[in-house]
Image (tube, rainbow, N blue to C red):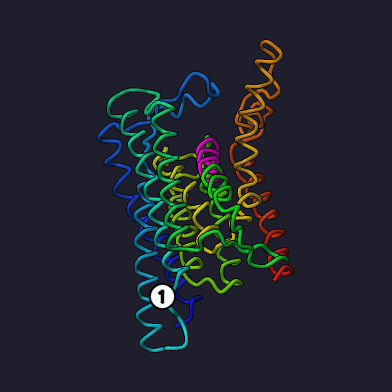
Amino acid sequence: MTTAIWSFGAVALAFVISAVIGRFLIPVLHKMKYGQTILDIGPSWHKKKQGTPTMGGIMFIIGIVCAVVISIIGAYVVGNVYQPSGYSFNKEVFMVFVSLGMAVLYGAVGFLDDYIKVVKKRNLGLTAKQKLGFQFAIAIAYVVINAFFGYGSKTYIPFIGTVDFGSWAILYYIISVIVIVGIVNAVNLADGIDGLVGSETLFVAAIYMIIASIMACAGTTIFSAAVAGGCLGFLLWNFYPAKVFMGDTGSLFLGGAVCAMAYSMNMPIILIPMAFIYIVEMFSVILQVTYFKLTHGKRLFKMSPIHHHFEKCGWSEVKIVAVFSCVTAIVGGIVTALVILGL
């Protein structure tokens, strides 16, 4: 059985598990009153979403984890038994499991944050220092494991080939930690309207799947397929009007997954363009705060993150999701073309 078949299986399995869990989880979250608190700093019309269940990211986390484990182990066992020259359990597959573990740990931090908000009734959840402390610890652990058991200081760059940073390795590791934490928080900030992060990450994962297939990274192809399937299953419940929110549980997991998919195929350089929309969202907040302080109260955008700016401009949530997803797909297409040309 080819990697394509196992990848299709991962998409289907993650989709079905995520969608089915939603059918049972959402009523439970309603019953336990695990509803989202809509802060006054957001758009006023979002107040009608008050009480919508959160922590729905549990749905696709379970779906993705199950799909990855079953599909990769199945591909390894069947591939080696029936196709000895086909699938092999290699360094890339090892890094897929390590990367999946990183994403799950970020999801756990998000779950803790959501739990404090909805159960302990502390609206802000974990403090900024606590959240960043956990996030940096996870990123550092991931980079250290990658350094000793994965690809070390070697990384693949299209048009150039495999580059070994050698004596500059420590700088590469430091930058990697900062980038991972930055992207994870960027994805978290982008989660502000129904279906947005789920749709964007669906396209990001689909593009990663194509690139991983081109690079013959079987494990990452399956991993990316599972993420795409999990997002699609979740969108059945999260697309406008949302019946459930992913919460920090889901957004931090997806942030970790977006980083993990690039690192597991040893091509982290494509992470920045693939995370283009998330980064724009993050910098819109940074620019808004900076401009507000420098001009003593003036605003650069009507509201940040920038998806709220477009809401204030009269765009519907569906239109914002469609436009942002299209931009993600276009950027992803360009990245894929560059990877192909750069082989």
Q: Position of residue 105 (x, y in %)?
A: 37, 47
| Residue at the spot 69% in from the left edge and 59% down from the top edge | 335
| Residue at the spot 38% in from the left edge and 37% down from the top edge | 54
Of 63 and 21, nearer the camera is 63
- In the figure, residue 74 lies in which quadrant? bottom left
Q: Position of residue 148 (x, y in %)?
A: 43, 60
Of 35 and 75, nearer the camera is 75
Q: Which residue is mark 1?
A: 89
Above or below: residue 101 compared with residue 244: below
| Amino acid under disc 1 | Phe
Q: Does the stretch in magenta take in 180?
A: yes
Q: Position of residue 275 (x, y in %)?
A: 61, 48
- In the figure, residue 186 lies in which quadrant? top right
Of 16 and 201, nearer the camera is 201
Above or below: residue 141 compared with residue 93: above
**Residues rendered magenta in the picture:** 179-191
Above or below: residue 104 compared with residue 86: above
Q: Is disc 1 placed on a helix, strand or loop?
A: loop
Of 95 and 298, nearer the camera is 95
